Image (cartoon, rainbow, N blue to C red):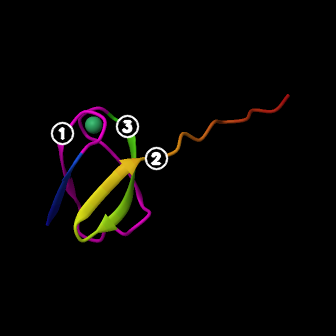
């Protein structure tokens, strides 16, 4: 099992088995969206904020 650190709140995050690169995970501590950028070593970055465009 791979562990990494949340770049937002520095919490330890365990990547679940089967997690793939580029997968979006949610920090269990602060709830921020994180993108898995590498699996070996486990690395996550803040996921780009997707702004919902509700249109008109
Ligand atoms: Zn966090």
| Front position in the image: 45 or 14 | 45
| Residue at the image point whose x is 52% and y is 44% from the top | 48
Residue 45 position, x and y percent, is 37, 49
Residue that badge 2 annotates: 47
| Residue at the image point whose x is 26% and y is 43% from the top | 6
**Residue 43 sits in quarter:** bottom left
| Residue at the image point whose x is 37% and y is 37% from the top | 32
Residue 33 position, x and y percent, is 41, 43
Query: Dot 1: within a 10 Å radius of its alpha carbon, few (fewer than 14), some, or many (20 or more) residues?
Result: some
Residue that badge 1 annotates: 11
| Residue at the image point whose x is 81% and y is 33% from the top | 55
| Front position in the image: 30 or 44 | 44
CB-based contact (under 8 Å), mark 3 and mark 2:
yes
Q: Let me know if residue 24 is in the magenta part.
A: yes
Seen in the image, is 44 located left or right of residue 12? Answer: right
Q: Identify the element where label 1 is drawn.
A: loop
Residue stretch rendered in magenta on the structure: 6-30
Query: Dot 2: within a 10 Å radius of its alpha carbon, few (fewer than 14), some, or many (20 or more) residues?
Result: some
Residue that badge 3 annotates: 32
Identify the main secondary structure in magenta.
loop
Disc 2: residue Cβ within 8 A of ligand 1's nearest atom: no
**Residue 23 sits in quarter:** bottom left
């Amino acid at each position: 099992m791979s562990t990494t650190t949340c770049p937002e709140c520095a919490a330890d995050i365990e990547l679940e088995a089967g997690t793939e690169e580029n997968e979006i995970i949610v920090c269990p501590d602060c709830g921020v969206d994180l993108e898995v950028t590498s699996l070996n070593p486990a690395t996550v970055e803040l996921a780009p904020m997707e702004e919902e465009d509700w249109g008109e």
